[in-house]
Image (cartoon, rainbow, N blue to C red):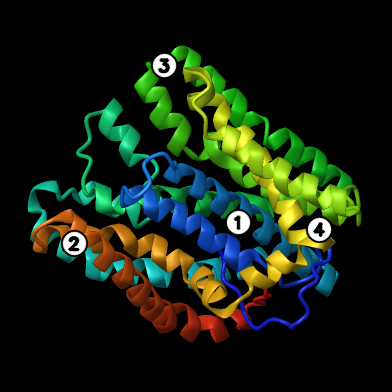
Amino acid sequence: MTVTEDKPTQLDNTPEARYGYVHGLDGLRLLAVLIVIVRHYELVMILPGGFGVSIFFFISGFLITRLLLAEEHRFQRPIAIKSFYIRRFIRLLPPLLLMGVIAVPALYYFYPEDFSPAQIAMSFTYLGNITKYGAMAWGWREGYPAIEPLWSLAVEEHFYLLLPAALLLFRTPRSRVIMMSVAVVVPLIIRVWYYEVAPVALADQFNYHFTFTRLDSIGFGVLLTLLLDAGWLRIPSRRFVGHLLVFGGGLLMLASMVHWSQAYEIAWKYSFQSLAIGIFFVGVIFAPNYRWLRRLLERKPIAHLGKISYEMYLWHLPILAVLVAVLPNRALAIPIALVATVLISDGAYRLTTKRLSGLRRRFGGHPV
């Protein structure tokens, strides 16, 4: 999950990795977090919350790679890994810690029986993707369901640690594309293997949460940026192609949510889903005949909610958990939680991310 800064008014995107702000991305971030929230709030049970996480993963891979390549092209020097890590921590850690300082004591007050120091420690140090599997495989205490979504932050943070080193190791556009093409296949191989050798319930948890089984969801976004940077992917100007990408990608995304088989659900789904997201993404973000949709996604209320999507992701379940504890029924808690999530997330964004944006720019922050 990334942050955006001031942007030009032109709404035409260029399919080159070296340019800055990408129009329409804040709106897609909002779509992703809304999918997660409506599923967690049990408003639409048929919609898998994990699909929203996959969208977040894809966007992160695309944007972070774009940011790193923009820096590389702009300064004509290798990626500054230290500055990159500092920027990421300035963006991600303050909102997370603010949520933890407020939400964890509140959860402990209302749900003391669920308190797990190990879960708290691991979730706030980017190891939260291990806790759910640990509870099932090794008998760990599960802890608070309200902070379980922090598992996806762990996967993203591990990706942030790996990507700059990979781009430094592979310096040419061709070698980078080949490297990432191989990298998006490896998680699928691991998932298929673990599905074959482990009990189904364990394989399901392992394949969904672990870093090396979910990096393809991020990797497809990385690969798109690398293909654009290498000049191997061109966006045709024909309207038919734009429609084919958007509608074809949309249909594939819907198909990816169908429970085709147990093996598909546990092992194959994430790769197919990420590929479908990528096809849809290219059409929405780059096709000339979808400028109207990018303009819609750039409308102020939509774009602003997209900017605070990270904070909304952090806060939506702790807020609901507290309201369920203090209100007479869940039906009353849900609409209040939705409003409270937006208001509190906006306040958290202004208190942390917005105030620290200048500090991020000191370390080479680039609008994406």
Closer to us: 36 or 93: 36
Closer to us: 262 or 60: 262
Q: Residues within 10 Å of mark 1 (few under 14, many from 20)?
A: many
Disc on res. 60: 1
Q: Position of residue 308 (x, y in %)?
A: 47, 71
N-terminal label among 4 and 2:
4
Q: Label 3's element?
A: loop
Disc on res. 98: none
Q: Residue at x 10, y 63 (%)?
A: 326
Distance (Cα) linking label 1 and label 3: 30 Å
Q: Label 2's element?
A: helix
Kind of residue at disc 4: Ala
Q: What residue would you read off at disc 3?
A: 198
Disc on res. 332: 2
Distance (Cα) linking label 4 and label 2: 42 Å
N-terminal label among 1 and 3:
1
Q: Residue at x 37, y 39 (%)?
A: 130
Kind of residue at disc 2: Leu
Badges 4 and 2: C-beta atoms under 8 Å apart? no
Q: Quadrant of residue 100?
A: bottom left
Q: What residue would you read off at disc 4?
A: 287
Distance (Cα) linking label 4 and label 3: 43 Å
Q: Residue at x 27, y 64 (%)?
A: 335
